[in-house]
Amino acid sequence: MRDGIETLNDSLSRLHRDVCEYFPFVVRIAVALYDAETGEIKTFLHSPLDASPLKDYRVPLAKARWLDEVRRSGRARVIGNLEAANLGEQEHSARILAAGYRASYTVPVFDDRGFLGFVFFDADAVDAFTPRVIRQLDLFVRIISLMIVNALRSVDVLFGGLRLLREISVFRDVETGSHLSRMSYYSERIARRIAPEIARDESWVEYVRLFAPLHDIGKIAIPDSILLKPGPLTQSEYATMKGHAAKGEEILASLIHDLSLEKMQHIESLRHIARHHHERWDGAGYPDRLRGAEIPVEARIIRIADVFDALTSKRCYKAAWPVSNSIAYLRQGMGTEFDPRLVELFLEEPAGIADIIGRFTEESSEAA
């Protein structure tokens, strides 16, 4: 539990303890979310926290044959005897079998927006999930489903409030959807790799991705004459532009209060992202001139993702840099502009970066 607020993983662990009072053979409960943009299913919550064969795992749902069948049918599935013949040959199947699970109960989760993901129960005994057990487990399924729906709906409420702010302001959104998508997935890429080192869970990784597009929300308050100026800014104009970071946190704090979202999962990460995404590792950034590990890790992540996408994208004032040049820029800034460890993690497996670039192509050359 962090800052007195029960996290989703805390809640799931508590529910798992309740389940085990009745059914001690249920050795794992997990939640996987569906990402409609990528078509992937990815781990989100699991109990126990310290022993999950699929921690930080993701796979295209289309390649997870039997899971896709569960999603399309909309009906839960019991596998009474887990073996390769029932699960297929995917990596996640091999991990499940290697963990010693002997039976599973899988439930698809939907809300009014459509398919959200799955809840999994695994047992250490064959044929553990009898009709009687399933009837009683379904109460816990409903509770877990409500946890997921409410958590994601809080994000929708927050985004809805911000969309309203955009509509009633003179702000023109100069960032394309493709830019925001790419930098969101770059951010997730870094967050997923650093999470085990800093004792953060998979739900935190997902919220970093969800919150990443809001990093520049403070630009709502910047006059168009400065925000959309085609040429260089004066010293005074640049000082005004820099104010968007602190203003972003102020806007979010007010909105969080007005919408009663103070207890929203990882909400402190969102405020850190808005205020500190222009801080530098060497302390020369703004607005608070934080240095090194003083800078919240979420903001350090967003800075790398945002800068890299700005470099590799075409803008009204510049051509897109080659990926190799952009990577070289990140490497040169390690220890000065950027957190060195996070840059290292981001640049691991370059094929993943190329995949994100290819998946979200430019919609416009006017992004900033």
Image (tube, rainbow, N blue to C red):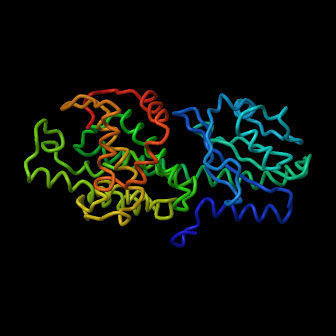
Which quadrant is the N terminus positioned in?
bottom right
Q: Position of residue 246 (x, y in %)?
A: 27, 60
Q: Position of residue 15 (x, y in %)?
A: 72, 62
Report the front residue among 191 and 337.
Answer: 337
Q: Position of residue 18 (x, y in %)?
A: 78, 65
Q: Is residue 11 above or below residue 223?
A: below
The image quadrant that residue 245 belongs to is: bottom left
In the rendered view, does 20 fall on the left or right side of 193? right
Report the front residue among 112 and 83.
Answer: 83
User: Residue shown at 44%/31% (left/top)?
Assistant: 354
Give the number of marks. 0
Q: Position of residue 231 (x, y in %)?
A: 10, 37
The image quadrant that residue 166 belongs to is: top left
In the rendered view, does 199 fall on the left or right side of 105? left
The image quadrant that residue 118 belongs to is: top right
Q: Residue furthest bottom?
A: 4
Report the front residue among 250 and 324.
Answer: 324
User: Residue shown at 68%/47% (left/top)?
Assistant: 54
Which quadrant is the C terminus positioned in?
top left
